[in-house]
Image (cartoon, rainbow, N blue to C red):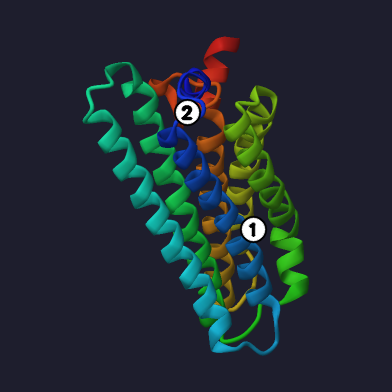
Amino acid sequence: MLKNFFDVLHGKDFISKIHEDFSNMLELSEKMFREAQWYLFVEETEEDMHDEIFKMDKEINKLEGNIRSKILEHLSLRVFTDIPASLVMMSVVKDAERLGDYIKNISEARTILNGPVNQAIYQELLGEVEIKITEMFSFTKEAFISSNKELAEQVGNSKKILSVKCEDIIQKIASSNMSARDAVAYALLTRYYKRLVSHLGNIATTVILPFSEIGHYHSLVQGNKG
């Protein structure tokens, strides 16, 4: 759906600017994620480190508003053939905006801990998840912008695997002897990571899903296999 939409409007200011703005949203989200990880681990922080993360989130919100405005303006010209793809764009733009919100939440876990995360505990619980999310950011952008179905499927499968893994981690935390403060902080981090996985998966799999099934990649795959 989106590939046809982009092909038809290739070179036009409308789609060119949406491409640019959406790419910037994903790039800013990925940068935010790297900054948030660093912020979690450093022994001593400066106020501007945290401020920079919030600044990037505001920029993501601004880009979301720009894209929505452009789509609504485009549809107001009675371009009815573009309605399905425009609705898809509205959906994925919201997913991209939510990435910034959850990454901002991740950075705030440091406040709960009253300091940096324990590297040994973090690596045991979330080290592998963090690596896979970093990979998903790169694959999601390429899958969506280039309509790469193989990468989209790979991200969709990662979403399924990591969602289950995050739930297992939360159960592990619940049955551990961590302090209440640590348990809350690491459980929240895990939940935020799971939400990042979900939103990245939603964005990437729009390449291969009909509009009515967006956000339900695994359910559709299971149905096709049945």
Q: Name the residue under label 1.
A: 172
Residue at 40%, 35% in the rendered image: 14
The residue pinned by badge 2 equals 216
Q: Which residue is drawn at 53% across and 21% down?
A: 3
Q: Nearer the viewer, residue 89 or 203?
A: 89
Q: Can residue 9 be seen in this view?
A: yes
Query: Residue shown at 64%/72% (left/top)?
Result: 177
Rendering coords of residue 150 (x, y %):
69, 24
> With 213 as the anchor, is 167 left or right in this view?
right
Amino acid under disc 1: Lys
In this rendering, is residue 164 above or below 49?
above
Asked which secondary structure carries label 2, the reply is: loop
- In the rendered image, the quadrant that contains the C terminus is top right
Amino acid type of disc 2? His
Q: Quadrant of residue 71?
A: top left
At x 51%, y 39%, the residue is: 19
Nearest to the observer: residue 134 or residue 194: 134
In the rendered view, does 217 fall on the left or right side of 115?
A: left
Q: In the picture, residue 201 is in which quadrant?
A: top right
Find the distance from the CA under tag 1 to the CA under tag 2: 27 Å
Q: Is residue 113 visible?
A: no
**Of 86 and 170, which appears nearest the observer?**
86
Disc ID at residue 56: none
